[in-house]
Amino acid sequence: MSFPPGVWTRERARRGLWQLLRIRRFEEKCVELYQAAKIRGFLHVYIGEEAVATGVIEQLQSADAIVATYREHGHALVRGVSAGAIMAEMYGKQEGCARGRGGSMHLFDRATRFYGGNAIVGGGLPLAIGLALADKMQQRPGVTACFFGEGAAAEGEFHESLNLAALWKLPVLFVCENNLYAMGTAIRDELASQSVAPKAAAFGIAHAAVDGMDLVAVDEVARRAVEHVRRGEPFLLECRTYRFRAHSMFDAELYRTKSEVESWKARDPIELFTARMQNEGILTPVDREEVEQKVAAEVESAVGFAERGTWEALEDLPRFVYAEAESP
Amino acid sequence: MSQVTSAKETITYREAVREAIREALRTDPRAFIMGEDVGHYGGCFAVTRGLLEEFGSERVRDTPLCESAFVGAGIGAALGGMRPIVEIMTVNFSLLALDQIMNSAATLCHMSGGQFSVPLVIRMATGGGKQLAAQHSHSLEGWYAHIPGIVVAAPGTIDDARWMLAAALERLDPVLIFENQTLYNQKGCLSDSPQRDLAHAAVRRTGRNATAVTYGASLGKTLEAAELLQAAGIELEVVDLRVLRPLDDATIMQSVAKTHRVLIVDEGWRSGGLSAEISARIMEQAFYELDAPVARLCAAEVPLPYAKHLEEAALPQVDSIVAAVRKLVGADG
């Protein structure tokens, strides 16, 4: 993709690199902590796919909403959910962003309109329809960004939701993170037609596919997609990406070859972006070093916050099954 | 078109539900109703007839046939500050949306540590008796009552048809309202001081010889049976559960402590059903009050058949309720 003039100032490039590195270093720490049994349950890391969440979510405004999947640490971080609250959630501490009720797969944050953290593949799409419908009916200008994998494109809810979004002209940005595998099932074994973006055409929805390893490309296409949605029509953006790590911590990776993984790692989104920005003379190796240090400090601080966190009292177990607040 | 009804005017259960929806749409700008055929068709059971003309297609919203997506959209709209009323044609179709009801509506408050709530009402027709066979006739409200995080209501009277919706819309939690399809044509008067809560069972008839615990369409049949039993000198107390989750244990146990004999009448199946739960609670909380084992009259353990005589035989009926009570009180020797 050609380099868009004027978009990438040094400040913006540093911020982009910062977001990419925050996800990477945070999740590397998560894997380490999982191996140390500090984090349990399912842990799905996003390593390799960072340019997608970064490129899309940086286009959103504070009034916009996000619905994500169980592989959503990166989305929460880029959105502005504090790293400490996310880490504490994974520890199961009550200082976590869901008070330890959700864990890695169910991060929530009201302040940033981050609606989870949905571990039912395809299950988030109808929620996004409803959030967008609420915005539209209340004449609010919000965009709802809904992330899902290409595995969800085989689910009925994908097709039902695209139909509703088009029928009702809803401001939903559908973001398909096509990482080529639905858990361990390769895309050739899951989708009869392996391009997701063109499926939107059947509903009359505008769509685009982009190299999801290239932050510059995702940023550019996502910016146009969000502008389109803000005018009141849905958009399907397919980001072609790759998960470098196993599906979860319980995955022997029998379904793909090491050489395939290595070939994708050669297109590491962080290295691609760093090299691009250095070649363009926008960033220097010193910038990378400084951002790395800043990120390391944030991750360390997040771990400290989680470690210092407290366990919710057992008598609070029945709380939050029903709403505690009065109806406004 | 139904008009605003005075307390003493006779109206149908259908009109009572419609009036409740009209009131919600009139008084709360956040409220809207959506579902299959709620608009131009006027509702599969004609409940929403006339509302499209009155409130427009934004707030009386026909949906495509996509239960999972429009129920999920209701959840999302509730998260986004609206007060959606979602109509699902029948409980059997709600199974296409079970994922959204179970995995999202019922869990989001808890999973988010109380940050998000889902003030959503889902109404659906339930129950047999209309010869609609095994994909339109079941009573699965007992299943739904298994799920923490939702409230399950079963209006069995004109008053409850009229007022439960408003109570449901006042809550911040997902409320499922099950309207038995045999009740829509039932006529009656609204009372002057109706019970409007979503927390308590109601004693619909007092008696001293036995208690019948029931709800929904079985309520009318049980009250009819109580009349017949009265003639034979047997006084049956009738408890209408009204709300299946959370169950109002106190009202049930008070009646048990008074009559010492209990029959549970439930159109759901017996195995693993709501009647089993109620029976277990009576054992746990009022065992020493019992003069006889708790009795149950439930749907036969078959998918509901089409043929009228077979369907009737599969469901609790006035005759079978009378027989079960007579056996319970030892009136047959």
Image: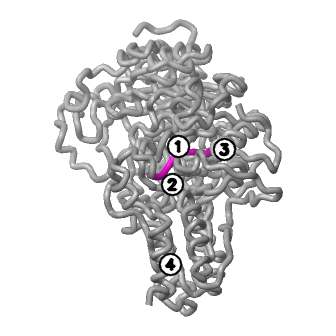
Q: Which chain carries label 3?
A: B
- Decide which of A42, A282 is in the foreground and name it: A42
For mark 1, give the secondary structure: strand
What residue does disc 3 label?
B17
Cβ–Cβ under 8 Å for marks 2 and 1: yes
Amino acid type assigned to the residue bearing label 1 in the image: Gly
Q: Mark 2 lies on which chain?
A: A
Q: Which colour scheme is used?
A: one colour
Which residue is located at x 40 percent, y 30 percent? A158
Residue A211: x, y in percent?
37, 19
Q: Which of marks 3 and 2 is in front?
A: 3
Magenta stretch: give its range: B120-128
Q: Which chain carries label 1?
A: A
Horizontally, is A263 left or right of A88 in the view?
A: left
What residue does disc 2 label?
A102
Estimate the spatial distance between the alpha carbons at disc 1 and disc 3, rounded to whole Å.
35 Å
Q: Which of marks 4 and 3 is in front?
A: 4
Q: Is the magenta stretch mostly helix, strand or loop?
A: strand
What residue does disc 1 label?
A116
Same chain under badges 1 and 3? The reply is: no
Estimate the spatial distance between the alpha carbons at disc 4 and disc 3, rounded to whole Å.
32 Å
Amino acid type assigned to the residue bearing label 3 in the image: Val
Q: Which of marks 2 and 4 is in front?
A: 4
Disc nearer the start of the sequence (4/3): 3
Amino acid type assigned to the residue bearing label 4 in the image: Val
Amino acid type assigned to the residue bearing label 2 in the image: Gly
Q: Is residue B139 above or below residue B58?
A: below
| Disc 2 crowd, CA 10 A, few/some/many (<14, 14-19, 20+) | many
Residue B257: x, y in percent?
63, 87
Disc nearer the start of the sequence (2/1): 2
For mark 4, give the secondary structure: helix
Horizontally, is B330 left or right of A209 in the view?
A: right
